[in-house]
Amino acid sequence: MKEPDLYQFEVFEQWTLYDRIVRNNYMKHDEISKSISDAIRHVSNTRQVWDLGCGCGLMASKILKTLQVESYLGIDLADSGLSRVSASLFGVVGEIETRNAELTSFLKETHEWSPSLILASFSLHHFQFDEMAEVLGRIRDQMDENCHLIWVDPQRKSHESREEFIRRFMFDVASTWEDLETSEVLQVEEHMLSSDFPLDASEQDSLLTKIGFSTISECYRDSFFSAKVLRKS
Ligand SMILES: C[S@@+](CC[C@H](N)C(=O)[O-])C[C@H]1O[C@@H](n2cnc3c(N)ncnc32)[C@H](O)[C@@H]1O
């Protein structure tokens, strides 16, 4: 059970800043969600969806709007986002449920229904390498043969250190995220320095192979982000 005062991601606590980042498309939610929708349009079963680190559900609403989704479960530690999920997904999916839970704990439990599609959008990079491997392993344990996992996250360039990635990212934020006040740019930087641990492409690929995933498609990649559609291998 989450202790509210231990919530560590201040930038998501007051949802307004991240909400503006998404609505201004600064993190390419529009292009990424479109590429995912295209990549999974032939997937026959997307009826039951888990959204791991759902935030306010806006990314899910963009991805799921062209699919037939009967049940949606959004999991997150931040009530500020969870309280907006129903509004984001109203009319897009059937039943909407949210759970305030830590992802690793949630994935250890046995659940009422199995997902046919799992979204992990901009959430897994908050785990450091060993924890991320554990979380991906637990996600795999919850998947049956027909379930798909969508993994969206920042991605370092090869040979780029975490510090270099953050410096490059922050240069882009400072020069193109024009709607943000200086204090908000600093908030983004503080969040990244304390909480973001993006992998590079080969680290992602070898981790996925080791855990037992095969990549159906890498449907999006730019100089900061990647999105993959995965299944159990
Ligand atoms: C950058 S937001 C992503 C929101 C949305 N999925 C999107 O694509 O825009 C990351 C979310 O993951 C949640 N999160 C990070 N680590 C978590 C954990 N260990 N357990 C539950 N939620 C977590 C944060 O609270 C936050 O709402």
Image (cartoon, rainbow, N blue to C red):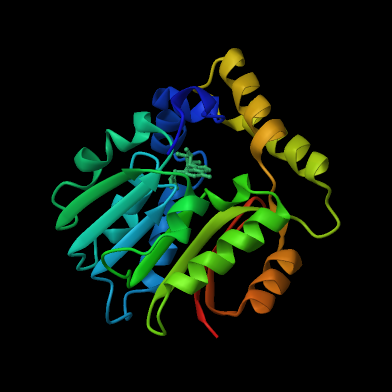
Question: Which residue is at 21% across, 61% downward?
Answer: 71
**Image location (x, y in percent) of residue 103:** 48, 50
Question: Compared to 140, does 2 lie above or below?
Answer: above
Q: Closest to the observer: 13 or 155?
A: 13
Q: Can residue 32 be seen in this view?
A: no
Q: Closest to the observer: 104 or 215?
A: 104
Q: Quadrant of the C terminus?
A: bottom right
Question: Compared to 185, does 227 lie above or below?
Answer: below
In this figure, what is the number of numbered marks? 0
Question: Which residue is at 57% across, 64% downward?
Answer: 136
Indicate the quadrant where residue 187 lies: top right
Indicate the quadrant where residue 92 lies: bottom left
**Image location (x, y in percent) of residue 85:** 27, 41
Q: Closest to the observer: 40 or 96?
A: 96
Is 67 on the left-hand or right-hand side of 125? Answer: left
Q: Closest to the observer: 114 or 153?
A: 114
Q: Can residue 103 be seen in this view?
A: yes
**Image location (x, y in percent) of residue 170:** 69, 32
**Image location (x, y in percent) of residue 22:** 43, 38
Q: In which quarter of the image is the N terminus?
A: top left
Is 16 on the left-hand or right-hand side of 227? Answer: left
Question: Which residue is at 53% across, 21% downward?
Answer: 180
Is 58 on the left-hand or right-hand side of 230? Answer: left
Question: Which residue is at 43% across, 53% downward?
Answer: 106
